[in-house]
Image (spheres, rainbow, N blue to C red):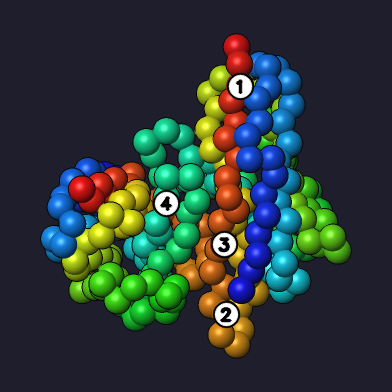
Amino acid sequence: GENVEQHPSTLSVQEGDSAVIKCTYSDSASNYFPWYKQELGKGPQLIIDIRSNVGEKKDQRIAVTLNKTAKHFSLHITETQPEDSAVYFCAPREGAGGTSYGKLTFGQGTILTVHP
Amino acid sequence: DTAVSQTPKYLVTQMGNDKSIKCEQNLGHDTMYWYKQDSKKFLKIMFSYNNKELIINETVPNRFSPKSPDKAHLNLHINSLELGDSAVYFCASSLLQGGEAFFGQGTRLTVV
């Protein structure tokens, strides 16, 4: 199965600063790399994803970069705002085939706090 | 018109009891999941169903029994509840296995 490591576990920044969260995975056949945001009292929600044929993807203030050789991908948030405060999860999808069904394996989560 | 809805939102019960959590999705997705989130926020898949067929069973104790009467519903029944079962349980669905997952609001289960 997929081993996923996410760092840091907590991240505290001032409003307007940038935040970067890194996710390392083990399955070289992984082909889909999403990031989820979980606000207090809610379920996780997809915020951005990237597929293995792309190195970077941006959506306004958030971006994801992928290094397939090194098997890691990162979430970048620029110009952070207090409403970005939440728990963020990476969830690489393992490659399907054999006994694998291509499930998402969630990282341990990063608690991001943006101070006004 | 909530996409993935689960009930109840909160569940407090005594050890040894049996309880059920219900989940429904109106997105037309083929795949549904149950996840468990512990007190440290660690989110782990328990089960995955594809069009009513069990696809993934992640070494969950057999006190936990999922049931999918149709592809829009996936319920979770738990027998002989233990203190360690206390957690938030999330139902989710996706169009295809391993695709973007849409989560419900969660059910906070507390076993006393």
Answer yes or no: are tags 3 and 1 on the same subunit. Answer: yes
Disc 3 target residue? A105
Residue A113 is situated, as x and y percent measured from the top left of the image, at 59, 25
Disc 1 target residue? A114
Q: Are marks 3 and 4 in contact (CB under 8 Å)?
A: no
For marks 3 and 2, the one nearer the N-term is 2
Q: In the rendered image, which quarter is residue A2 located in?
A: bottom right
- Specify the label residue B37 is tagged with: 4
- Specify the label residue A100 is tagged with: 2
Residue A42 is situated, as x and y percent measured from the top left of the image, at 39, 39
Answer yes or no: are tags 4 and 1 on the same subunit. Answer: no
Label 2 packing within 10 angstroms: few (<14), some (14-19), many (20+): few
Q: CA distance from mark 4 to mark 1?
A: 24 Å
In which quadrant is the N terminus of chain B drawn?
Answer: top left
Q: CA distance from mark 4 to mark 2?
A: 22 Å
Closer-to-camera residue (A38/A65): A38
The chain to which mark 1 is attached is A
Q: In the rendered image, which quarter is residue A47 located in?
A: top right
Determine whether B93 is above or below B8 in the image: below
Determine whether B68 is above or below A56 in the image: below
For marks 2 and 1, the one nearer the N-term is 2
Foreground tag (3 vs 4): 4
Q: Amino acid at mark 3?
A: Thr
